[in-house]
Amino acid sequence: MTHPETAPVTRRRWRHSLRLQLVTVFLLLALAMAAVFMGGMQRIFSTGWRDAARPLVADYMDRLVQEIGTPPDVAKAQALAERLPIAIRIEGPRVNWQSHPDRPEHRERAGWSGRAGDWLSRPTADGHRVSFGLGTVPWQRGPHSPVGWVTLALLLGLIAAAYAYVRRLLRPLDDMGAGAERFGHGDFDTPIPLRRRDELGDLAQRINTMAQDIKGMLDAKRGLLLALSHELRSPLTRARLNAELLPTTPDGSGAGEPERAALLRDLGDMRDLISDLLESERLASPHATLQREPVDLAALVREVVADRPDAAAVTLGLPAGLPTLALDRMRMRLLLRNLLDNALRYSAEADQPPRITLTRQDGGVLLAVRDFGPGVDAAQLAQLTEPFFRTDSARQRATGGVGLGMYLCKLVAQAHGSRLQVDNAAPGLCVQLLLKE
């Protein structure tokens, strides 16, 4: 019995398979051509050829009746029925005989009654009537021939050969699909193999050329961004140093303390932005390497929280006995710092402080950072980890950041083989990632 879900799945697979569609079209075309040919030939034989053959058949029937004789000789009629593929029936006052008495269907098929019997039967001089019909054809007299099974096997073999040829013909499409997926993930080092020299091969070559052009543009953009970031660091450091050395005097001859603090804060934001840009480009590169070392994640969380002046406003759930993980300490510190900054920023007016918890799960450690703030609109959750994205509430705040913190956290998680999961916790936002041993 067919499962109710099998038919939709089969239809969906057929619609997405160009090979199956082509083979189906070939089969339908072959069946349609065979049906048209057989119908046309049957029409020709059933109309024109019947009228043309009737005189010949009538003359042949007369000769057979003469050979049977008058009165009809049953022995001669039996010999004719065995020698020729015909059925004979004799009806009359003295002889009533049928060559195939065990096959009553011959009466209807041979035309012994009805309009066709008028020219397939002949009367004799002594009042008998001899009727003729189709008898046993030669291939029905011997043992059954395996021609039918051989024909079916050949048809199935031809279908399998057609499918194999179409599969081989369209194999470059599989290569192009796999290549497009690699290029989408940033792997431009393995081009699409060129298996053919036709239109599909030309298309594969064009896609390879396009991929190399995209790689060149991305490398140029990344190189320009890194160069600008490096070049901006030195004058920014000098500007911050000069701002810290500005004199502050009561008579107004120097910079005021509020102005200097605002200038230092802006310079600090610019420094953090440049550092985040550099780190995001390093992590986004497919050749990014991690400096893994055994890390006690609970101790690292305590260090990051202790570096904050408002460390007392954070709740920790760090059980003992957690396994030591092979992590990049510097980048995990960056991830924890960004997640903690976001949690504290949106917990300023919340009833509860943000919470960081570690839990053993699936042979690793599940890190969860939750705040109890207003949360994020469900439509914006998927965009939180995109570069330079900020929610509407963050754009209205002076401490909204530039939108690189969550993006960096996503890159750090991916570099460690994990995935950053962001969910509304009602209230607040919960960010989780599972780090394996």
Image (tube, rainbow, N blue to C red):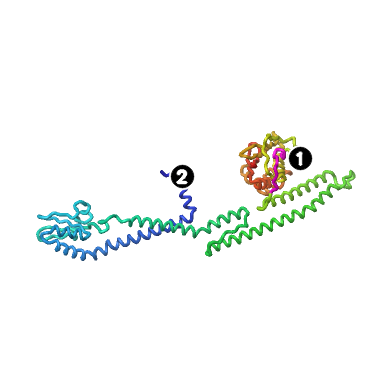
Image position of 358 with respect to 167: above or below:
above
Q: Quadrant of residue 204?
A: bottom right
Task: List the residue tagged with mark 2.
Answer: 5
Residue 395 appears in the figure: no
Residue sitting at x 46%, y 55%: 20
Q: How many marks?
A: 2
Secondary element under disc 2, as helix, strand or loop, is loop
Q: Is the C-beta separation of discs 1 and 2 under 8 Å?
A: no
Q: Indicate the position of residue 205 as horizontal and vertical percent values.
A: 58, 62
- Tell me, yes or no, whether the highlighted magenta stretch contains residue 139: no
* Horizontal arrangement in the rendering, residue 288 relative to residue 200 (left or right): right
Q: Residues within 10 Å of mark 1 (few under 14, many from 20)?
A: few
Give amino acid for label 2.
Glu
Which is nearer the N-term, disc 1 or disc 2? 2
Estimate the spatial distance between the alpha carbons at disc 1 and disc 2, rounded to whole Å: 57 Å
Task: List the residue tagged with mark 1.
Answer: 307
Picture quarter with the N terminus: top left
Residue sitting at x 53%, y 64%: 197
Q: Which mark is residue 414?
A: none
Q: Indicate the position of residue 125 as horizontal and vertical percent values.
A: 10, 61
Residue 160 appears in the figure: yes
Secondary element under disc 1, as helix, strand or loop, is loop
Magenta-colored span:
290-301
